[in-house]
Amino acid sequence: MKMLTNISGNKPRIAFVSPHDFQGGASRIGHYLFEGFRKEGFETAFFVGRRSLEDPDVHHIRKYKNSGQKLWSKFQRRITWELGHENFYYPGSTDQIIDWNPDIIHFHNPQGGYFDLRKLESLSANIPVIFTLHDPWMFTGHCSYFIHCQKWLDGCGSCPDLNRRPSLKRDGTAFNFKRKQGIYRNSQFYVATPSAWLLKEAEKSMLKDSIVAGRVINNGVNEAVFTPKDSNVLRKSLNIPEKEIVLLYVVNSQMQTNPYKDFTTISNALEQLRLRKKEGQKFTFIALGADGESYEEDGIRVIYAGFQSDMDLISSYFNVADLYLHAARAENYPNVVMEALACGTPCIVTNTGGVPEQIVEDVTGWVVPFEGYNEMTDKILELSENPEKITKASIEARKWIEENHTLSHMINDYKDFYELILKEKHN
């Protein structure tokens, strides 16, 4: 393994920056990297907008330098909301990071109400900055995902949906676009994306002239937690018969209303499954992350498992499932698909964003068309008649993760990228 050093010949000091310390997929990836590099003897710090972990190397970002700025921020938030402008007024958000004197600053999602994007110009002029893009927000007029909209290519304005997160009260998307464009015009930084799809989009966007180098680095999965294991205790507690096919769908919030998820396709597939399955055939569908009354109708049992934060329990739900279903209207490279595969749970996913890159077709899972609930139903029925295909795909899914997508793979890929960045800095 190569020895990564800074200009003084020492292991570099790496500052990771994220909205949260462990909540949400992007922040979890940031934490995995922070902890992984720290275990390898690097000096690391994790600067976060919201802190929940008791860790001396995790620092809550002080967004304001004094009480006057904090008071003024309330006025700023009100004005920007009324105008439809994104709020970047966090004047103290880079002070702790700069004072820590890092060799590299690595961002995971600069949005989230904690970082003043306007600071990027001065920050990147003095310290190499890398962004891992977990969504397209950096190059849109406000939304995290554009969903069939191409206005981000030429300036936004006349936004088709101001409610897409992060939402706006009025259409200030053209202003937001121009302001971001001006910030990037005077900045230079590096970009990594978990999917080839997102890097391709970024290189067409307003970021293209500011990206020094871009690289696809897939997310890693905690293969020690998300692993094949005996789930009979959970299966019995849910009263699921041994040979009944179990389908799982995971969503973190607002399962039926989240604009970027696609529960409609899942729901339609379940309805088709109810109508088209053989007489006497039964399925159990588990909605993990959503609350509701469980019920059974015509051989389809629906269990709402609610929000779970215990990773071992989430892993058990993946192991209970025979198939993981993933449908989205917009998506990059979701951790949940990787976690399912790591547990040996084959996936049926819709052709959305970077999701197909996570599947080895007919080996670890299957890709169906966007909103393709009929095709999803076809595949579920086909596999229910051929359980040996599920068993084979289960073995291949875990093998694929072990050979390509562990945390060690991700850390080593970033280590190579950091080496390139520091080499350019030395020169």
Image: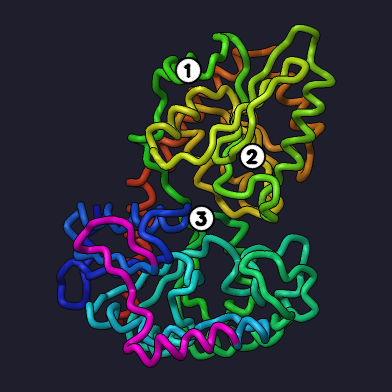
| 347 sits to left or right of 126 | right
Residue 425 higher or lower than 362, as above or below: below
Q: CA distance from mark 3 to mark 2?
A: 17 Å
- Residue at image point 51% right, 60% down: 193
Q: Which residue is mark 3?
A: 194
Residue type at the position of mark 2: His
Mark 2 closeness class: few <14, some 14–19, many ≥20 residues within 10 Å: many
Q: CA distance from mark 1 to mark 2?
A: 25 Å
| 171 sits to left or right of 8 | right
Q: Are marks 1 and 2 in contact (CB under 8 Å)?
A: no
Of the image marks 3 and 2, the number of the one nearer the N terminus: 3
Q: Which residue is mark 2?
A: 326
Residue 275 in picture, x, y percent from top left = 84, 21
Task: Specify whether residue 109 is painted magenta.
Answer: no
Task: Specify whether residue 67 is painted magenta.
Answer: yes
Mark nearer the viewer, 1 or 2 = 1
Q: Which residue is mark 1?
A: 237
Q: Which residues are magenta?
A: 50-78
Residue type at the position of mark 1: Ser
- Residue at image point 73% right, 10% down: 281
Residue 53 higher or lower than 389, as above or below: below
Question: Which SS class for mark 2?
Answer: strand
Q: Residue 140 got which mark?
A: none
